[in-house]
Amino acid sequence: MSTDSGIDRALLHKLAERERSLFTDRHPGSASAYGKADHLFGRVPMTWMNKTAAGFPIYLATARGNRITDVDGNEFIDFALGDTGAMAGHSPEAVTSAVTRRITELGGLSTMLPTEDAAFAGAELARRFGLPAWSFALTATDANRWAIRLLRAVTGRSKILVNSYCYHGSVDESLIVVGPDGEGVSREGNVGAPVDVTETSRVAEFNDLAGLERQLAHGDVAAVLMEPALTNIGIVLPEDGYLAGVRELTRQYGTYLINDETHTFSAGPGGATAFWDLQPDVVTIGKAIGGGVPVGAYGLSAELADALTGRGDLDLIDMGGVGGTLAGNPVSMAATRATLEHVLTETAFDHMIGTASAFADGIQKIIDGYALPWSVSRLGARVEYRFANPAPRNGTESAASADAELEDFLHVYLANRGVLLTPFHNMALMCPDTSIADVARHHEIFDAALKELTA
Ligand code: PMP
């Protein structure tokens, strides 16, 4: 696998400086707002918002469908979609009217009382993902945390196994990568780990069944927590037989399997679980299912739900470590119901996936035209290119193909011409409002960027 991006570094550097300076010229209002935010830690409401290729973030004015405008009046075609939180498009009408009705007509922002919308959402998630018992959180991170606790309780085992370079939210157990000797080590940059992560976790490379079996054979793994395709270190797709092998091995070693569908939901209405006909014990999800309103969820198999309900020693009603005051609140539930019932429907997915195919095909053609050693991967409505060909097979390979300067250049070049990609990688996501014309506009700019880069 080549990890050489195939780009002249001096030229890249010069072009990147030009684009950053153009960005500064085009965003005086954002620059000024950023400069004044003296009482925000890092000048932003959440530190990740400093992940910006241009030196400061764009300040949001409006967002509708797949369009964003900033405080300087620039308009963007948005392929970032809040890193999946807005996969349903920004403020879809069905969601805003359901939420508005809940807030203004019916009332009840936070009551600690169930609503019928929650039962609808649970039933719809059960239909789509094939697991019968659902519970809600406010983030995918919390859905993962609570699922982990439940599976530790049921198995009496202490460890969670994840894939190297996975991301499952700010979950302590997941901040581990495969080290040079094949065993787990703390992920670089892991902030304030409560204990050495190898005490709580094991790790294997994606697409490596032998490595997985070596770790499971210790007999101390309560659950494998995984995305059916990695999506947070580029898209890394499963090879033939890998996911079936994971299921077989987890069953063989008495380990539960959690599919985190927070991003792989892009594969279709029932996520990768339905798309690849997978049989996890638990599904976790968040972000998109709320249409932009905070929500997370986990679904349990009947066997697990029964086992947990029968455990009188576990405090699931009060302060036993699972649940939260605002989880399942009437607003999240109204939004989730509306998103699943009216927005992220089978018809919408057909359109989004068709648009993503056009996006991927066009990118591939452009890359081939410049003979660059890059590759494109698609998972349903989500597309990503990496600076390596063939496409990386696991997280470590994908991490090695990163090229921060090149990535930043492309992000700023696109932003300067009215297109946003997700700031963490070269990911483009389609929502129901994304059109083929939007894809064509992206490709026109992408082609122009590569022409300059390879001149
Ligand atoms: N799981 C996956 C697969 C994710 O990609 C993310 C966020 N990128 C999360 C969980 C956590 O989501 P949140 O930050 O909304 O808790």
Image (spheres, grey):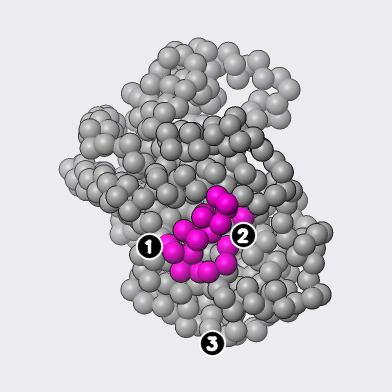
Q: Which residue is mark 3?
A: 252
Element class at badge 1: loop
Q: Which residue is mark 1?
A: 237
> Would residue 422 be counted in the magenta stretch?
no
* Residue beneath the point at 54% across and 32% down: 100
Q: Which residue is mark 2?
A: 135
The image shows residue 396, relative to residue 409, as above or below, that is: below
Magenta stretch?
116-136
Determine whether, in the image, residue 259 is placed left or right of residue 176. left
* Residue 107 shows in the view: yes
* Residue 385 shows in the view: no
Amino acid type at mark 3: Gln
Few, some or many C-alpha atoms within 10 Å of disc 1 (few <14, some 14-19, many ≥20)? many
Amino acid type at mark 2: Ser
Answer yes or no: disc 3 within 8 Å of ligand 1: no
Of marks 3 and 1, the one in the foreground: 3
* Residue beneath the point at 75% across and 77% down: 311
Q: Main secondary structure of the magenta part?
A: helix
Residues at circles 2 and 1 in contact by the CB criterion of under 8 Å = no
| Residue 178 quadrant | bottom right
* Residue beneath the point at 57% across and 52% down: 116
Determine whether, in the image, residue 112 is placed left or right of residue 121. right
Element class at badge 3: helix
Q: Which of these two is toward me, 8 or 172?
A: 172
Few, some or many C-alpha atoms within 10 Å of disc 3 (few <14, some 14-19, many ≥20)? few
Tell me residue 299's x, y (percent).
Answer: 56, 64
Of marks 3 and 2, the one in the foreground: 2
The image shows residue 5, relative to residue 158, as above or below, that is: above
